[in-house]
Image (tube, helix red, strand yellow):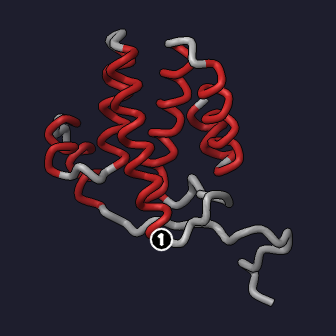
Amino acid sequence: MSIHENLLGGPPPTHLPDDPEPRELLASGTAAAEVAAKHPTSSLAWARLADEAFERGSVVESYAYARTGYHRGLDALRRNGWKGHGPIPWEHEPNRGFLRALHALARAAQAIGEKEEYERCSQFLKDSSETAAETLG
């Protein structure tokens, strides 16, 4: 038996492939809009744009950025074997862009009064990664 075997019988964790360039550009101070334009499939860049918009009070803009990052992340997850449920570990750094976008979408949905979407996204985040839900708040 492998130490990584899933004893609960659920789907295995999904680990997105690493794409370090957007993460490195953001870490070096490159504007999130520039990173998203250069790497439009990067959920992390869209999540950062969502965070920046939310921080300046542009909640609808934050919602739009978060939704873009969320859908880009869903596309990547599906391309990498995810079947619509199962763990998406926060501990695997390439997954964090999607998880951050999902959190930002829940936050913005709550702010604009989309209660059902807020609840759905919040539960999806917890179901995907308890660690992400705790870390992101």
Toward the bottom, the furthest residue is 1
Q: Is residue 74 above or below residue 13?
A: above
Toward the right, the furthest residue is 8
- At label 1, counting other C-alpha atoms closer than 10 Å, the crowd grade (few under 14, some 14-19, many 20 or more) is few
Residue 9 picture location, percent across and down: 83, 72
Side of 7 where 110 appears, left or right: left
Residue 79 picture location, percent across and down: 44, 69
Task: Report the residue at 43% width, 52% height from top.
Answer: 73
Residue receiving disc 1: 80
Q: Is residue 14 above or below residue 61?
A: below
Residue 26: which quarter of the image?
Answer: top left
Q: Is residue 89 above or below residue 18?
A: above
Residue 38 picture location, percent across and down: 14, 50
Task: Report the residue at 38% width, 50% height from top.
Answer: 72
| Amino acid type, residue under disc 1 in the picture | Asn
Instruction: Choose between 67 and 30: the one closer to the eye.
Output: 67
Task: State how many labels appear.
Answer: 1
Task: Report the residue at 30% width, 31% height from top.
Answer: 49
Location of the C terminus by quadrant is: top right
Residue 2 picture location, percent across and down: 75, 86
Secondary structure beneath label 1: loop
Task: Report the residue at 25% width, 52% height from top.
Answer: 22
Residue 1: which quarter of the image?
Answer: bottom right
Side of 132 where 80 appears, left or right: left
